[in-house]
Image (cartoon, rainbow, N blue to C red):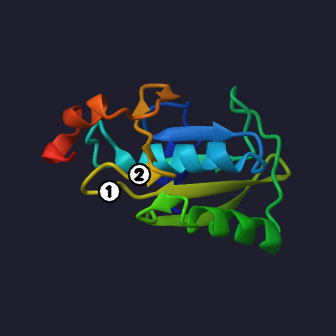
Amino acid sequence: MTPDELRDAFAEEGERAERKESDRDADEILRAACALANDLQQSGRPGYLVLGLDKKGRTVGVDASDEGVQRLVNRLTSTKILPTPSFSVEVVPSQGLSVIVVRVATRPVAPLTRIWRGFPNVGLCIRCLTTSGRSALPHGTT
């Protein structure tokens, strides 16, 4: 990961960055990855999911062992997100602890769905994409 990408990953939460304190809540991780891949703002920039930072950006650390990283990769490649997002995973040291940064590439056509529900990232929150909301998707997708 380049220094610029790390800076973007550790930036405040927003449309292209999401923080999670741990990797325990699989649903939240899947929602965040789905929303970052959808890129409904059409920024064209990758999104960053950072595990091991709290909401204020303080490092709390996460299990970055081979098993911990593999568990995360297995979640992201499961059939709970269709199609599977394109992503890379990197373990980054931060204040003596390990943080996992997932760089999620944007999808050319939304919506990427999690268990048959779309999750766009709208500002600082992730919302469930409803049937009526699909008409507002870019590229005329429904």
Where does residue 99 sit, x and y in percent of width and height? 73, 53
Q: Is residue 131 above or below residue 97?
A: above
Can residue 47 be seen here? The reply is no
Compare residues 89 and 129 and report the one nearer the observer.
129
Q: Quadrant of residue 63?
A: bottom right
Residue 126, above or below 65: above
Name the residue furthest left. Answer: 140
Q: Residue at x 83, y 68 (%)?
A: 65
Q: Amino acid at mark 1?
A: Arg
Crowdedness of circle 1 by 10 Å Cα count: few (<14), some, many (20+)?
many
Q: Residues within 10 Å of mark 2 (few under 14, many from 20)?
A: many
- 95 or 53: nearer the viewer: 53
* Residue 111, horizontal then vertical, whole percent: 33, 49
Q: What kind of residue is marked 2?
A: Ala
Q: Nearer the viewer, residue 116 or 67?
A: 116
- Label 1, on which residue? 107
Residue at 79% across, 74% down: 66
What secondary structure is found at the residue carrying circle 2? helix
Query: Quick check: 89 left or right of 82?
Result: right
In which quadrant of the rendered image does the C terminus lie? top left
Residue 88, x across and y down, in percent: 53, 66
Q: Which mark is residue 37?
A: 2
Image spot of residue 110 (x, y percent): 29, 50
Q: Do the residues bearing badges 1 and 2 touch, measured as CB atoms within 8 Å?
A: yes
Q: Quadrant of residue 41?
A: top left
**Frontmost residue, 100 versus 129:** 129
